[in-house]
Image: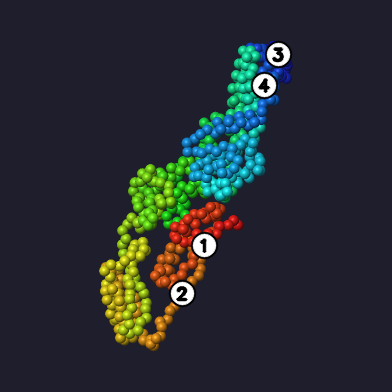
Amino acid sequence: PEIRLAVGEPALELAHVETVLDALAGTCYYLVREGRGFRFGLAPNLNKLLADRRASVDETQIEARVREEVRRVFARHEHIQRIFFPERSNEIPDAPVLTIVVMPPAATIRDAETRAQIARMTREHGASARTFKSALIWSVPESAEEMREHARTLLALEAIRDEEMEHLDEKQREQLERQMHTAKRDLHESVWRAYRHLMLLGDGNGMETMDLGLLHSSAAEDMVACILHRLREQGIVERTIGASFLVRHWPPALREWSTRAVRDAFYASPRFPRLLHADALKHTIARGVEAGAFAYAGKSEDGRYEPMFFETALDPEEVEFSDDAVLLKPEDARKVVQPAELTRIRIDPVSVQVQPGEGVAFRARGEDQFGRPMDVPHAIWHARRGHINEEGHYTAPAEEGADEVWVRCGELTASAQVHVDKMESGEPKPEGRIRWRGEVPVLKVMQFYTKVLTPFVHNPSLVLRMEFEVKAPDGIEKAQQVRRALRDLGLSDDVEATYD
């Protein structure tokens, strides 16, 4: 009150007097607070001791204390992997696990070298390319100065407590405890304010930056929880995924999709949301199987699907992530689940030229409801002019002219044309050569095989040459998958993979 009276004047806001007094008490070396009053003494106060101690704090101690507090702010979370202060890319595991990578306090977002290092370590894992690039969420500080200053103050106060506590009076000890509490809180909050930036792989396969804004410890239990909350708001991280999402994003070229590849896609491709925990996919697969969105099956070495689950209840615990556990589209699952039924027959060859009295063998070929080859049981043969036995062996009549051969199986029938013509002795039958070259759309490859190549698959002269070329942001990584698939088919795995 005496100070207010002494400095008060009409133009002065008296509320500022308390603020100024508090600031003086925190900066003056010989000003002492006693109750509600102040006095200048001859002995230095705690501010003087603190200033001297701050000047002597070792820089390595400051760095260590800041890093310790950063580790405390980024608390452990179930299913989330934390990597602190990596210097090399192989310090970050390449695994299908959501990983928060915390950069060192000195590696700030403003530093171009820091951003380049993050981009490099996202794509590399040691000497090889990283597969699960999308699993990495980088937390990058804006500045280290505030954290370091608060750490310096806290270390100086702790040194005073450890070395000069006995020389302090009761009021100074109380003041020391208050200042230590404040310094710990300030250091904690400075870490929250500093680590406000995230970097992660974007849809265009480039690094994207996200600013979380002004953060404080009341925003969440810890920094990891805060980051996950923001990423879930943006749809970047999801707890669960619907079965329809898998159906919409089914790779067009795959008839079957291994569960390992399904899981890996959520941590390797930025086009997929990151899953908080991969086991959520087990529940997604179980729901999709029960709804008939797809089937889940184990694939044996001989290509059989056993066991097969489709449109039935499936325990999520039975789902495993493996190359031998696959998802099948409904139409393919029904081919396995439903018994084959003969729905179409045809005669091979469909047209033939023979000499009078000459024989030729016909064969009845069948297809089931899914277009797959099937034997024709109990085929009944008939020829209009010539003779044909029950095994399909035809003998031409003595007279020239046209003839027709039929085969019947139940209510299904097919026919073939026979041309009976005399040819000079020794004259070979003419052979026609068929050759085609062109591009086949990916979605019509199976139709091309069924409708064009099927009549010639048993002809030893048939030669099929394949070549494909595709550009993709993760093409180099996918080359390994292509090589494995080619080896599984018994083909050469000589795949050319280069950067443009």
Q: Which mark is residue 50?
A: 4
Q: Quadrant of residue 373?
A: bottom left
Q: Quadrant of residue 417?
A: bottom left
Which amino acid does the dot numbered 4 rest on?
A: Leu
In the image, residue 314 sits, relative to residue 17, either above or below, namely below
Q: Is residue 191 left or right of residue 237?
A: right
Q: Position of residue 392 (x, y in %)?
A: 30, 74
Q: Give the CA distance from mark 2 to mark 3.
A: 108 Å
Nearest to the observer: residue 316 or residue 51: 51
Residue at disc 4, secondary structure: helix
In the image, residue 144 sits, relative to residue 319, either above or below, namely above
Q: Which mark is residue 468?
A: 1
Q: Residue at x 49, y 35 (%)?
A: 77
Which amino acid does the dot numbered 2 rest on?
A: Ile
Which amino acid does the dot numbered 3 rest on?
A: Ala
Sooner in the amino-acid sequence: mark 2 or mark 3: 3
